[in-house]
Image (cartoon, rainbow, N blue to C red):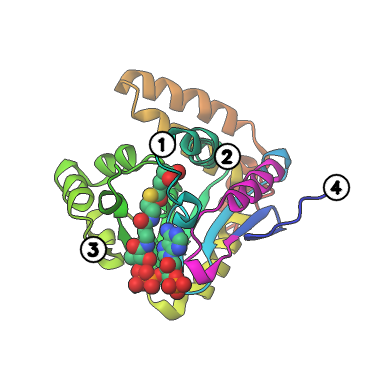
Amino acid sequence: MAHEYQHIKFDYREGVGHIVLNRPDTLNSFTQVMHDDLKAALSFLESREDLRGLILTGSGRGFCAGQDLSERKPLPAGQKRDLGLGIENNYRPLVLRLRALPAPVVCVVNGVAAGAGASVALACDIIFAVKSAKFIQAFAKIGLLPDAGGTYVWPRMVGTQRTMGAALFAEPVSAQRAEEWGLIWRCIADDELESTIASVHEHLAKGATRAFAATKQAVYASGGNTLEAQIDYERDLQRELGYSDDYLEGMMAFGEKRPPRFSGR
Ligand code: T3D
């Protein structure tokens, strides 16, 4: 039976998945049900041979306020909660599956992104954020460290000082500052949210999907490679792309001075 989504909205058209985190009353904070929904949506996307991209956003005024803290009510005296379990079972697979998806994952941050909500947004391949959005490393306020890849992604994107400052002081980082820092690709006007989602959809649905996927693979592999190893890796990926329909079409379109019509194959 098809999965019935409760805490997200999920749609798939022209090879592009759209996930909308959908608990606006709690700023789309992560529940177990939302994680189960996300797992089902990702399984669907991973099964599609025609996949060309994924767009992730939130409903209402927030993107995601991280873990739903109402699911972390204090336990009876003497008992302690194993917080590693939620990371192992939910956040780890979520972030790793987004990274492994063989197509770009674009996050359009529509409002505040806090705690694991910020980590998940920033684990995406490209991030847009509306001007009123902010990123908050809220963890320290409840006695935790940034998780869901928060201590991996931030220092690589913005350096140690900004990472430490944002994490230890838990001060909101505005979308404009996030763009200046290189934490996100682009800060957009609030009223450009829908048009940005539409144009990103168009770009993914009509783009050179295999080239996008190879670019994603190569960029993430570079962190663990020497220059020599990386150039070798690029060579191997480029060789594969050279055999693709999209490369033939791109070259033909160039010669004929017309826009390419990429099939994604
Ligand atoms: O536990 C584990 O598994 C370990 C893993 C942890 C990962 C994490 O994500 S830990 C970090 C968890 N998140 C937070 O600590 C953030 C908590 N939220 C906030 O600090 C603030 O809500 C924001 C700064 C994000 C936004 O502030 P503001 O003033 O714009 O909105 P608000 O009024 O605080 O929130 C609106 C409603 O959403 C409110 O409900 P109400 O009063 O209208 O009924 C609020 O309680 C609810 N809400 C916000 N965040 C959460 C939440 N409800 C449950 N869980 C939340 N995380």
Of pointers 3 and 4, the one earlier in the residue sequence? 4
Of pointers 3 and 2, the one earlier in the residue sequence? 2
Q: Quadrant of residue 56?
A: bottom right
Task: Find disc 2 in the rendering and name its residue.
Answer: 101
User: Is disc 3 placed on a helix, strand or loop?
Assistant: helix
The three-letter amino acid code for the residue at tag 4 is: Met
Residue 244 falls left or right of residue 82? right
In the image, the segment drawn in magenta is 20-44
Placement of 107 over or under 158, stated as above or below:
below
Q: Tell which of 120 and 254 is nearer to you.
A: 120
Other-residue count near label 3 (Cα within 10 Å), few / some / many at <14 / 14–19 / ≥20: some
The three-letter amino acid code for the residue at tag 2 is: Leu
Of pointers 3 and 1, the one earlier in the residue sequence? 1
In the rendered picture of this protein, how many numbered marks are placed on residues?
4
Placement of 26 over or under 222, stated as above or below:
below
Task: Find disc 4 in the rendering and name its residue.
Answer: 1
Q: CA distance from mark 2 to mark 1?
A: 35 Å
Q: Tell which of 71 and 76 is nearer to you.
A: 76
Disc sitting over residue 177 in the figure: 3
Numbered disc in front, either 2 or 4 = 4
